[in-house]
């Protein structure tokens, strides 16, 4: 019988970043629907909900005062200002999910990523940056999704260069010119990261058992001679 310890592992903290419109939301939602071992880190934000968004599912929509309280009471793993609104990752739900052996997806930008890289859990971070196939394609996607005003789209496009400039700070960089292939690539990255030796603490116990079995076998063979 295979020892149960070989299946134990620490959860991943999976960061997926991109300029707005590059496709990260589509990709992460697909992953969440397909894999029961992956959960979403729901961010807190001071911005107003968009059409169809629900509090607690898409974001925790809070006031500026409540957000400041969360910072001061160390309730956030990271926080940043994006387009004049504040965003942050609540600590409690992430810690609970990781303790349950789940992988947690973070839909955050480079600012939040840098903060998490400075945290005590940096060893469990897997950072993926999604690039658009072109800037023209990025603008087309922003317009087609119909979520933002022309003014907001213009702001997102003007910020794209600065966001893209941080691509080299990530472990993996994918160009999303084919959403199906990009999704397959993300799945492959996650599968590989799950099997890394340092994320499987139970493997040491299993190998120790194998070594003991080897030793016992050799000892028995010698005793029969």
Image: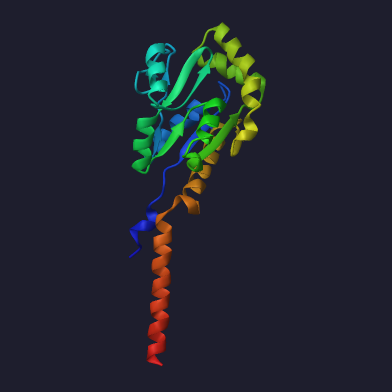
Quarter occupied by residue 143 = top right
Who's the residue at 35% across and 42% down the image? 99
Q: Position of residue 69 (x, y in %)?
A: 38, 18
Q: Quadrant of residue 161?
A: top right
On the question of residue 187 being in view, the answer is no
Residue at the location (41% across, 69% down)? 210
Above or below, comparing residue 133 to residue 154 in the picture: below
For residue 54, which quarter of the picture? top left
Q: At x 62% / y 17%, what residue is drawn?
A: 159
Residue at 57 percent across and 12 percent down: it is 153
Residue closer to the observer: 196 or 84: 84
Quarter of the figure with the C terminus = bottom left
Quadrant, the N terminus = bottom left
Residue nearest the viewer, comparing 26 with 121: 121
Q: How is the image coloured?
A: rainbow
Q: Residue furthest front?
A: 72
Residue 29, percent from left and from top = 44, 30
Q: Does 216 appear above or below 154?
A: below
Residue 174 appears anywhere in the view: yes
Residue 15 coordinates in the image, percent (x, y): 50, 33
Q: Position of residue 179 (x, y in %)?
A: 55, 31
């Amino acid at each position: 019988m295979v020892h149960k310890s070989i299946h134990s592992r620490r959860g991943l903290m999976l960061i997926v970043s991109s300029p707005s419109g590059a496709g990260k939301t589509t990709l992460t939602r697909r992953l969440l629907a397909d894999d029961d071992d992956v959960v979403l880190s729901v961010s807190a934000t001071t911005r107003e909900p968009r059409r169809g968004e629900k509090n607690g599912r898409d974001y925790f929509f809070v006031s500026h005062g409540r957000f400041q309280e969360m910072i001061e009471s160390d309730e956030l793993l990271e926080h940043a200002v994006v387009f004049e609104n504040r965003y942050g990752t609540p600590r409690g739900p992430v810690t609970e999910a990781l303790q349950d052996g789940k992988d947690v997806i973070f839909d955050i930008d480079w600012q939040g990523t840098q903060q998490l890289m400075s945290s005590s859990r940096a060893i469990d971070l897997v950072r993926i940056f999604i690039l658009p196939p072109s800037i023209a394609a990025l603008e087309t996607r922003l317009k087609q999704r119909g979520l933002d005003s022309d003014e907001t789209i213009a702001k997102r496009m003007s910020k794209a260069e600065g966001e893209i400039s941080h691509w080299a700070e990530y472990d993996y960089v994918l160009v999303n010119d084919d959403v199906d292939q990009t999704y397959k690539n993300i799945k492959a990255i996650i599968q590989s990261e799950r099997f890394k030796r340092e994320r499987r603490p139970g493997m040491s116990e299993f190998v120790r058992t194998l070594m003991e079995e080897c030793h016992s076998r050799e000892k028995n063979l010698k005793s029969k001679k």
